[in-house]
Amino acid sequence: KKNGDLSKSRNAVIGLGMLFAMVLVDIGRYYMIPYTDYSTFTRIGLFLFIILIGIDSLERNMKMILLAQKAQIYEELAYHDSLTGIYNRTAFDEKLCELNKKQLEDGSVFVMIADVNGLKYVNDHFGHRIGDVYIQSASRILVDSLSDIGGIYRTGGDEFTVIIENHTNREIMLHVEELERQLTKEEEERKLGELFSYGTAIFEKEQDTTLNQTIARADEAMYVRKQDFKQ
């Protein structure tokens, strides 16, 4: 930072020095050459001074733009999953903390827990690259069907959490129906059964003191559905 400050000071000093020298030249010309334009060199010096200051300003603006871009990249890396591009566990934990600080009303938060089916089998028999494709496919279905009304988070290796706030049951169910359609299509194409199992729950004051309990209920519902898949 000190080097940058010195560079800015040096350019300003050089510019002022050039302007001062040009003014002295015009003063000399005033006494030595009568009946002439006595401000020519002063104007040149002022022009050069403005150019140097402009260069400094441009360099500062470019550095600020680069810093902003770097900050955005770091934020993307910190809060997004590298495999799927959706929010990661860190983003989920922050969202959960934020919601738990609020006075939640009944039905204000809908939670879905989804878990990829048979991922271990796929990894063992077809390799982790194919397993990654399964995870990406699950993420794509969740994003395509639910991301316009809620946040999608990859909260574990094969686990996803969806949080939807302040939407009616009808709105949510329409999107869940779309999710079911995409799951069925994926199942028909892969011939390996349902891609992932999911469970849902809605925050209710009588049952949940925090959203963690709502998530636990959605998790239980997901495991019930997963047992049906295994059978």
Image: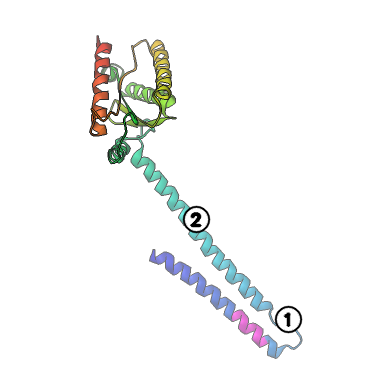
- Residue at x 44%, y 48% (from the top left corner): 69
In-image side of 136 versus 222 (left or right): right
> Dot 1 lies on which element?
loop
In-image side of 145 versus 119 (left or right): right
Q: Pinpoint residue 185: horizontal percent, then vertical percent.
A: 42, 13
Q: Where is mark 2, residue-wise? A: 62
> Dot 2 lies on which element?
helix
Q: Amino acid at mark 2?
A: Met
Rendered image quadrant of residue 106: top left
Separation (CA) of disc 2 from disc 1: 39 Å
User: Which quarter of the figure is the C terminus placed in?
Assistant: top left
Q: Amino acid at mark 1?
A: Asp
Magenta segment:
21-28
Q: Is residue 179 above or below residue 41?
A: above
- Residue at x 27%, y 38% (from the top left corner): 100
| Residue 31 seen anywhere in this rendered image of the structure | yes
Can residue 202 be found in the magenta stretch? no
In-image side of 207 versus 47 (left or right): left
Q: Residue furthest right?
A: 35
Magenta segment main secondary structure: helix
Q: How many marks?
A: 2
Q: Is residue 134 above or below residue 26?
A: above
Q: Where is mark 1, residue-wise? A: 37
